[in-house]
Amino acid sequence: MSREVRAAVFRPDDERLRKAVELLDSLGATPVPDPMLAVEPTGETPRTDGADYVIFTSKTGVELAAEAGWAPGDGTVVCAIGEATAEALRDAGYRVDRVPEEFSSSGLVAALDGEVGGKRVEVARSDHGSDVLLDGLREAGAEVRETVLYRLVRPEGAGDSAERAAAGELEAAIFTSSLTVENFLAAAEARGVRDDALRGLNAAVVGAIGEPTRRTAEERGIEVDVVPDRADIEELARAVVEAAAPTYRG
C-alpha cells in the first residue's frame, strides 16, 4: 500500500535544490526543500605555480575558478572527486585527467596513491573539506597545498524542515554532507525543537550520501537507514523514497 512520502532535502538554494525537488517529485514524493548551505566565495583561485596536480572537490569550486578566469598550468594533472565535478570542469572548457571510481576523498586518494609521491598537489575546495583527502595525499608522499575557494554557511531562515520533523510531518530526509546534518541540528536548536526534531527524524527514513555523512549523523543521535553504494544524489533519493514507500513511482 502506498503512502505519502514527505521528503526533506537540504541542497544549496540554486540549481542543485531545483534538481533535487524535480527528482523527488518524479519519484512520487512530496519535496520539502530547506536549504542548509549557502556559498560565500573567498575570492581565492587555485594556485598553479609549480603544481603537478590540481584537485577540485565540487561543482561550486569549479564554477568559482572558471568565473575568475583560472587556467591549469602546462602539464598539470586536473582531478575531480566525482562525476558531477568532472562534468562541471568539462562544461567550463577544462580537461579532466582523473576521476576516481569511488566518488569520495578516500577514493581519490586510492586512485592517486603510487603516483603523487614527491609531487606538488593543489587542493581547491570549501572551508569544510575532509581531512581524509589532505592526510591521505601526504601519506602517499605528496606535497599538499590547500586553497579555500568558498565558505559554507547556514542560511538565515533555515529550519522549516526541523519544525516539520518535530511535528511528525516528515517521512524521509536526505542528507548530502556532514555539514547539512550539523546545520539542520543547529537550525532545530535555534527554533527550540532539537529533541523533537531528532525523534521525528528517527521515526522517518533517513538517507546519507556516504559514510562520513552517516557517521556525523549517527554521532549526533540520528539513525541512518540508507547509504547508497555510490555517493550520488539520484541513487540516494531513489533508495530513500523506496525505503519510505516501497510502491514509489519511478
Image (spheres, grey):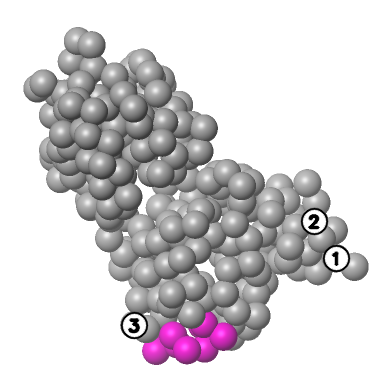
Q: Is residue 33 visible?
A: no
In the rendered image, the residue lying farthest to the right is 1
Residue type (three-letter) at the residue carrying disc 2: Tyr
Q: Position of residue 76 (x, y in %)?
A: 23, 17
Q: Element type at marker 3?
A: helix
The answer to whether the residues at label 2 and label 3 have Cβ atoms under 8 Å apart is no
Q: Is residue 92 left or right of residue 144?
A: right
* Residue located 26% across and 47% down the image: 135
The answer to whether the residues at label 2 and label 1 have Cβ atoms under 8 Å apart is yes
What range is drawn magenta here?
191-199
Q: Main secondary structure of the magenta part?
A: helix
The answer to whether the residues at label 3 and label 1 have Cβ atoms under 8 Å apart is no
Q: What distance separates the C-alpha of mark 2 from that of mark 1? A: 7 Å
Q: Is residue 182 left or right of residue 135?
A: right
Q: What distance separates the C-alpha of mark 2 from that of mark 3? A: 34 Å
Mark 2 closeness class: few <14, some 14–19, many ≥20 residues within 10 Å: some
Mark 3 closeness class: few <14, some 14–19, many ≥20 residues within 10 Å: few
On the image, numbered disc 1 is attached to which residue? 2
On the image, numbered disc 3 is attached to which residue? 190
* Residue located 73% across and 51% down the image: 27
Residue type (three-letter) at the residue carrying disc 3: Ala
Residue type (three-letter) at the residue carrying disc 1: Ser
Q: Position of residue 222 (x, y in %)?
A: 52, 76
